[in-house]
Image (tube, rainbow, N blue to C red):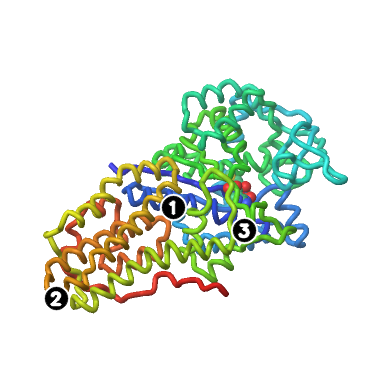
């Protein structure tokens, strides 16, 4: 029976140009999705656009566009982003789609039926930019207005009739749930943050607005628009054909294995979402992983500071594998991380151009010249050859567990060290020196190093899919069938096939570039 794995990234607000934070969030999730496929899981990886609410309505008005037309255009920009980032998402959901509408209405009705919704009046602070309500102690004065302490976004006073969700009655049950499911919120620092917040006691949550029209109307009271976060979070089950809970997709993939999110939207995913689901008598996702923020030169990236690194410009100039690798190598997942062009160049040159890329080029060119272009096969390996190969193979259980625990940085560190060791092995073994007098030894060295290149390429495949697919294709392995288990198969290169056309994998980035 195939094992299923459902992973999601937050659906983007289509309200401006895609930035590095969007890219980071999605690339991280893509790496986990690709890794699970290598582990032979049947993976569903979802992303999309979050199109309703006051923020989008205001943006559309600013651009003098009908909101639907505005969303059509911008949603397309984000769909293209998924291509530029080489995401392997299986679906791209838009919250303006009919399948989503049906699902939100069902959630609403379930909450009404369970007695968790009542009508009252909201008066308090609201940030349109965050689409979030804030308490008095969560805001502060700034210049001549007020802002949210956590996000820095402007807040405005709102007073309007509103439906409320009885969130207050869920505090205890949520705390019990967190206790029973210690891995529900990761990393640990985020879990503690959430628990502290819930322990303070939760207030009922306003879940409808009446001061704008762009969204899904409340059934039987269409002056009210369903709160955009209740709407948006539901996308995760709309994509599984909810409300049809007998649908194969829903049965196979719900509850989700992991929602990968940025820390700014933790409360929505780790408090509101499980409370809505528990109230609607639906299973709760297994894990919410909150990554940190991408900073530029230690500061939050922002237009006004002029320190924005545009992901599309970087991809155009240096390549997508280069950006993917740099982001996840440099930023410690779970913490905030600073990025800069200078560090990107160093990282790409050291790890990709000079190390992995160079190793492949040197080995393959040597084989082309000295072995009639055929990958040698050998069963006469010395201890030093076996040691190199076994070192990696013996680490497999650890590597798999690192990935499954979202310890991406440790994983990369280990894989890169294998690549450095492989380079050293090739230099020290000097196949060129034994070529004449001991061709058998030369074959053993070349077989070992190609085998190791194969294994490193498989491990790097979720991170830099383009380059590693090229390498695997050069050594005649069908990339569609590559799995983690292919690493254990040391007979796969035994048919002495020819090496395919050599392609440049990574150009070194020069200083003036
Ligand atoms: N629409 C909501 C998500 C709804 S999910 C039911 C949203 N959209 S967003 O476009 O603002 O953000 C998309 C993702 O990018 C989120 O995971 C967010 O945390 C992440 N990031 C946005 N800026 C970021 C950084 N500067 N750094 C890292 N990730 C950040 O939130």
- Residue that appears at 15% across and 65% down: 377
**Could you classify mark 2 by the number of other residues whose Cα lies within 10 Å: few (under 14), some (14-19), or many (20 or more)?**
few
Confirm or deny contact between disc 2 and disc 3 (CB under 8 A): no
User: Tag on residue 31?
Assistant: 1
* Residue bearing the label numbered 2: 436
Q: Is residue 472 visible?
A: yes
Q: 240 left or right of 261? A: left
Q: How many other residues sit within 10 Å of disc 3, few (<14), some (14-19) or many (≥20)?
A: some
- Which residue position holds label 3? 19
* Residue at x 20% of width, y 77% of height: 370
- Secondary structure of the residue carrying numbered label 1: helix
Nearer to the camera, 376 or 312:
376
User: Would the CB of label 3 be found within 8 Å of ligand 1?
Assistant: yes
Secondary structure beneath label 2: loop
Q: Is residue 101 left or right of residue 371?
A: right
- Distance from the alpha carbon under mark 2 to that under mark 3: 55 Å
User: How far apart in space, not on screen, are marks 3 and 1 (Cα)?
Assistant: 19 Å
Q: Is residue 487 left or right of residue 9?
A: left
Of the image marks 1 and 2, the number of the one nearer the N terminus: 1
Name the residue nearer the viewer: 292 or 510.
510
Q: Position of residue 360 (x, y in %)?
A: 32, 68
């Amino acid at each position: 029976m195939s094992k299923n794995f459902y992973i999601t990234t937050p659906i983007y607000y289509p309200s401006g140009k895609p930035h590095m934070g969007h890219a980071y969030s999605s690339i991280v999730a893509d790496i986990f999705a690709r890794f699970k496929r290598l582990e032979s899981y049947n993976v569903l990886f979802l992303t999309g656009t979050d199109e309703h609410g006051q923020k989008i309505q205001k943006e559309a008005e600013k651009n003098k566009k009908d909101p639907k037309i505005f969303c059509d255009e911008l949603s397309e920009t984000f769909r293209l982003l998924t291509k530029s980032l080489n995401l392997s998402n299986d679906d791209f959901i838009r919250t303006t789609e009919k399948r989503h509408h049906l699902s939100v209405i069902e959630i609403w009705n379930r909450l009404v039926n369970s007695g968790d919704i009542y009508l009252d009046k909201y008066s308090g602070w609201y940030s349109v930019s965050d689409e979030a309500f804030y308490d008095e102690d969560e805001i502060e004065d700034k210049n001549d207005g007020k802002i949210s302490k956590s996000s820095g976004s402007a807040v405005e006073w709102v007073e309007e009739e509103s439906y409320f969700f009885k969130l207050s009655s869920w505090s205890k049950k949520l705390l019990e749930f967190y206790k029973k499911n210690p891995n529900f919120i990761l990393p640990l620092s985020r879990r503690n943050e959430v628990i502290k917040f819930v322990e303070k006691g939760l207030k009922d949550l306003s879940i409808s607005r009446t001061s704008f029209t762009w969204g899904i109307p409340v059934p039987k009271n269409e002056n009210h628009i369903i709160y955009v976060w209740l709407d948006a979070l539901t996308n995760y089950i709309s994509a599984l054909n909810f409300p049809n809970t007998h649908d194969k997709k829903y049965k196979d993939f719900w509850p989700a294995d992991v929602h990968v999110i940025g820390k700014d939207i933790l409360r929505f995913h780790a408090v509101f979402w499980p409370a809505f689901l528990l109230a609607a008598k639906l299973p709760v996702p297994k894990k919410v992983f909150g990554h940190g923020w991408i900073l530029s030169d230690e500061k939050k990236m922002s237009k006004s500071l002029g320190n924005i690194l545009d992901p599309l410009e970087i991809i155009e100039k240096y390549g997508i594998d280069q950006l993917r690798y740099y982001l996840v190598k440099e930023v410690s997942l779970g913490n905030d991380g600073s990025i800069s062009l200078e560090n990107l160049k160093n990282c790409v040159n050291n790890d990709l151009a000079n190390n992995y890329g160079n190793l492949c080029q040197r080995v393959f060119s040597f084989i082309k010249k000295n072995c009639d272009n055929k990958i040698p096969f050998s069963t006469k390996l010395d201890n030093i050859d076996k040691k190199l190969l076994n070192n990696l193979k013996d680490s497999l259980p650890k590597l798999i567990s690192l990935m499954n625990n979202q310890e991406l940085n440790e994983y990369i560190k280990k894989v890169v060290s294998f690549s450095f060791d492989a380079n050293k092995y090739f230099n020290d073994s000097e196949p060129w020196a034994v070529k004449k007098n001991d061709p058998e030894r030369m074959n053993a060295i070349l077989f070992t190093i190609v085998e190791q290149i194969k294994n490193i390429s498989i491990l790097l495949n979720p991170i830099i899919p383009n380059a590693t697919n090229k390498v695997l294709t050069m050594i005649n392995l069908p990339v569609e069938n590559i799995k983690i288990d292919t690493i254990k198969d040391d007979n796969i290169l035994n048919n002495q096939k020819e090496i395919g056309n050599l392609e440049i994998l990574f150009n070194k980035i020069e200083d003036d570039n």
